[in-house]
Image (spheres, rainbow, N blue to C red):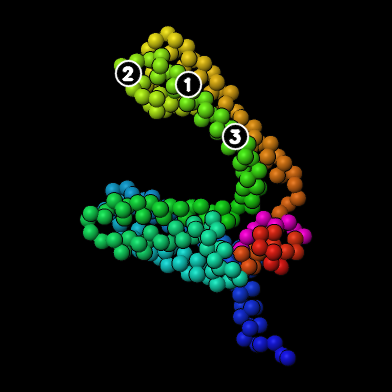
Amino acid sequence: MEPNTNSLSHSKWRSVLHEVIFEADTPVGKAFDIVLLCCIAMSVIAVMLDSVSAIDSQYGRILYHIEWVCTILFTIEYILRLLCVGRPFMYAKSFFGVVDLLAIAPTYLSMLIPGSQYLLVIRLLRVLRVFRVLKLAYYLDEASILIQALRASRRKITVFLFVVLTIVIIVGSLMYLIESEESGFTSIPRSVYWAIVTLTTVGYGDISPKTSLGQALAALVMIMGFAIIAVPTGIMTAELTQAMGQKKVSTQACPECSAEGHENDAVYCKFCGAKM
């Protein structure tokens, strides 16, 4: 039985489209990435400039047209990404799939919400377009190493954050008992807020202890803050060193689920099991 010509043609067309959009090791793929990078940068800059009243009043119309051109281009790109993968739903619900949707949805949603009473909502939707900057991670070779290190250190950092949360609750409760409401420590949550600001060495100065015992506790928390800041840095440094020493990952994306981060000699996708 002869193979279906239409099926083979569709498969080849999808394979070529996938190579152009998802791969970065071919001339066409690199050109596509460069064009998309320029569009992302242009759209993010346009959204940021649009928030400046003086610029918006003079160049608002131009920025409006730039926004729509970028939105249409991103919409076409999003549709093509869904078409060239074997499992479009897996890509749609992935991190970058959601980012791609966030990059185009606010522009269309702002058309459906007219009326002055919704201006704040429209402004929020316009700010969401800045999520396009997250698409830049597609094109950074080091992004996979950084993500791998973050994933490897998430449990340690979670435990660390739990310890920090415990410390600030205890310190905040003690400070609430030591200081009076006149000093600004009107409740335990507000005292915990002070403990977080002090422990992270931010020091806004809106609340400060007045008693000698309170100031001694504050000094202890400040010293503790310097030691605590170094912990997540050390965890990430260790994981980054380990990730960089491991086998270099390939830039090839799975043709079925669009997942990346495979080893150079990978035959099957480690996420969905499809043949690479």
Q: Are marks 1 and 2 in contact (CB under 8 Å)?
A: no
Closer to the chain start, of discs 3 and 2, is: 3
Amino acid carrying mark 2 in the image = Glu
Q: Is residue 220 above or below residue 41?
A: above
> For the N terminus, which image quadrant?
bottom right
Report the residue marked by disc 3.
159
- For mark 1, give the secondary structure: helix
Q: Is residue 129 left or right of residue 273?
A: left
Report the residue marked by disc 1.
171
| Mark 2 crowdedness (10 Å alpha carbons): few <14, some 14-19, many ≥20 | few
Task: Identify the image quadrant of residue 12.
Answer: bottom right
Q: Is residue 259 shown in magenta?
A: yes
Report the residue marked by disc 2.
181
**Disc 3 versus disc 2: distance between alpha carbons?**
33 Å
Q: Is residue 238 shown in magenta?
A: no
Residue that appears at 71% across and 68% down: 275
Any part of residue 226 in sight: yes
- For mark 2, give the secondary structure: helix
Residue that appears at 58% across and 71% down: 84
Q: Is residue 83 above or below residue 40?
A: below
Stretch in magenta: 258-265
